[in-house]
Amino acid sequence: MNYKISQRAASLAPSLTLAIDSKAKAMKAAGEDVVGFGAGEPDFDTPQHIKDACAKALAAGFTKYTPSSGIPELREAIAAKFLRENGLTYKPSQIIVSCGGKHSCYNVILATCEPGDEVIIPAPYWLSYPEMVKLAGAKPVVINTSDKTEFKVTPEQLRAAITPNTRLFVLNSPSNPTGSVYTPEEVKALGDICVEKNILIMSDEIYEHLLYDGAKVKSVASFSQAHYDHTIIVHGLAKAYSMTGWRLGFLAAPEPIAKAIDAVQSHSTSNPTSFAQKGGVEALNGTQEHLPKWLAEFDKRRRYAHTKLNSMPGVTCVNAKGAFYLFPNISKTGLKSAEFCARLLDEQKVAAVPGIAFGADDYIRLSYATGLANIEKGLERMDQFCKTLVK
Ligand SMILES: *Cc1c(COP(=O)(O)O)cnc(C)c1O
């Protein structure tokens, strides 16, 4: 049978991360001692009080459809979060709860972009952004950055990438995959350009709470009414509350955009899982006491890994100030990222994600969302591997 695959689906790049990941999993299943740095999720469990709230809702029969964009209680809790933490005023009607932050991103792109539109994406990027843009029929325009600027795009670079077709600029700070964090001044400078050129900003702030070394973040929406009017904030509970499997994300947008996204969602997924939403309410309104503990643990691992990586021959690594990733430069080992990762897995049983998956072939991504003992073991092996490459 000759199946016709839509242009839309056929245009997507197959996930490079999955090839390594499935190999690592197969090796583990075969009893091999694989150390995994591939995780894109915290290794902590969801805090108990959040699970309890969900279990309670489930037991009480809160198992039916909810309003497509989320229950009022959760949208109010999200609006309260934006006011409390970001000084931003959103009405619940400007907030859409979706099935994960990824779904929120997709909704934004689908509701604002169409064929002929260009979307500016700084690289290294979260690998789904360009593919989502392609799914919407629009064109990803990538701006390359390097460790020399801590992977941050400059105002000059942004200006140079803008054309009359530019519709959206994607900003992700703290960043996956690099962990880099834009200062408030840097965010404002990029936001100013978007306001001047009348370009929307999709600001993916899902790692907002995972910050180190005293780093501070400020949402691009918060600099002026004009910035607010040009910004759609994408956020979620996956990372700061370790709720990746719950599939709960949210966005805050100017009213007309929220309305359009509401329509898209109402005809695609409808509401995120009803009882999960009750857990989401508890996550936002309940105690936040897990967070400092997690941050202290992440920070310890980050410091160790950063120092160790920089001691390896052929490897240099700028320190990340956010998220739970490091993005070392491996170009001086003489290998490109895919071969580096394939051989690291074969020869030392260490799984990392090749930078090429994020549009940056001189780097690899290491997630430190795994225990310190594991990190020590894995990096010791990576050190051995690098010593075979660089004499
Ligand atoms: C994890 C992540 C998300 C959202 O993940 P969900 O599990 O869909 O909530 C969004 N953006 C970035 C950059 C991420 O790393």
Image (tube, rainbow, N blue to C red):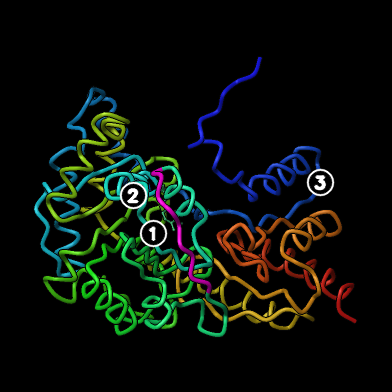
Q: Is residue 137 magenta?
A: yes
Quarter location, residue 2: top right
Q: Position of residue 282 (x, y in %)?
A: 24, 47
Percent position of residue 181, x then y: 42, 75
Q: Which residue is mark 3?
A: 32
Point 14% across, 75% down: residue: 224
Give the residue type at disc 3: Glu
Residue at 36% across / 51% down in the picture? 116
Residue 283, numbered circle: none
- Label 2 beta carbon less than 8 Å to ligand 1: no
Mark 1: amino acid: Val
Q: Is residue 272 in the magenta section?
A: no
The residue to which callout 1 is attached is: 119
Q: Which residue is mark 2?
A: 109
Range of magenta residues: 136-144
Alpha carbon distance from label 2 to label 3 = 41 Å
> Dot 1, how many residues are within 10 Å of its Cα: few (below 14), some (14-19), or many (20+)?
many
Magenta-drawn stretch, dominant element (helix, strand or loop): strand
Count neighbours of disc 2 (C-alpha within 10 A) and say few if under 14, some if 14 to 19, many if 20 or more: many
Nearer to us: label 1 or label 3: 1
Q: Amino acid at mark 2?
A: Ile
Q: Nearer the viewer, mark 1 or mark 2?
A: 1
Label 3 secondary element = loop
In the image, what residue occupies the spot 18% across and 47% down? 258
Query: Tag 2 or tag 1, which sits nearer the N-term?
Result: 2
Q: Nearer the viewer, residue 191 or 63?
A: 191
Dot 3: few (<14), some (14–19), or many (≥20) neighbours within 10 Å? Answer: few
